[in-house]
Amino acid sequence: SRAEKLYKLAYELDFLGLRLDVLATIREEIRDQVNVIMSTLDNLMVVASLMLTVGFGFAVEGTFPPASAEALEDWNLGFFRIDPLVVYSIFVSGSLIFPFWCLILTIMMRYEVDCIIWAH
């Protein structure tokens, strides 16, 4: 009968509406997750730039060990010997290299996320 056809059509329309609501909810959830990722990348960029600033400040301001450190004996680690000033220079170079590359890579990731967002 005609009433059954209308009920069936109304049921199908309600079902399609429910599917659209579920898809909209999933889309909003994905958008929220992307916003969390972007804010995490922004925080990581701030931390990396601060660490780079501090490391650069140490290197430029000349916070080097005193001259008496030249007289220190090499550290004997069993299988090799190393000068304490070499260890210091490795840490100073790491304090410049690692934050720099962290900043570069987070900028690249942020750029890729922005490109993906604007593409959709």
Image (tube, grey):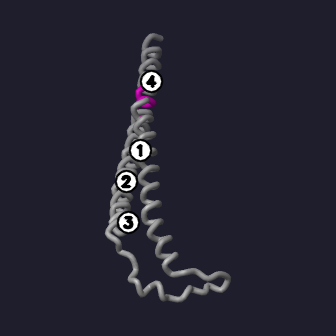
**Residue 120 in sight from this viewpoint:** no
Residue 62 falls left or right of residue 22: left
Mark 2 and mark 3: Cα distance apart in space:
15 Å
Q: Name the residue at 43% across, 38% down.
A: 26
What number is the disc on residue 110? 1
Q: Which residue is mark 3?
A: 55
SS class of the residue under badge 4?
A: helix
SS class of the residue under badge 1?
A: helix
Q: Which residue is mark 4?
A: 11
Q: Looking at the image, is mark 4 or mark 2 earlier in the sequence?
A: 4
- Magenta segment includes 29: no
Task: Give amino acid for label 3.
Answer: Gly
Residue 20 at x, y = what percent? 42, 29
Q: Looking at the image, is mark 1 or mark 3 earlier in the sequence?
A: 3
Q: Nearer the viewer, mark 3 or mark 4?
A: 3
Q: Nearer the viewer, mark 2 or mark 3?
A: 3
SS assignment for the magenta stretch, majority? helix
Q: Looking at the image, is mark 3 or mark 4 earlier in the sequence?
A: 4
Q: Which residue is mark 2?
A: 45
Q: Looking at the image, is mark 2 or mark 3 earlier in the sequence?
A: 2
Q: Which contiguous range is marked in magenta?
A: 16-22
Compared with 71, 57 (above or below) is: above
Q: Looking at the image, is mark 2 or mark 1 earlier in the sequence?
A: 2
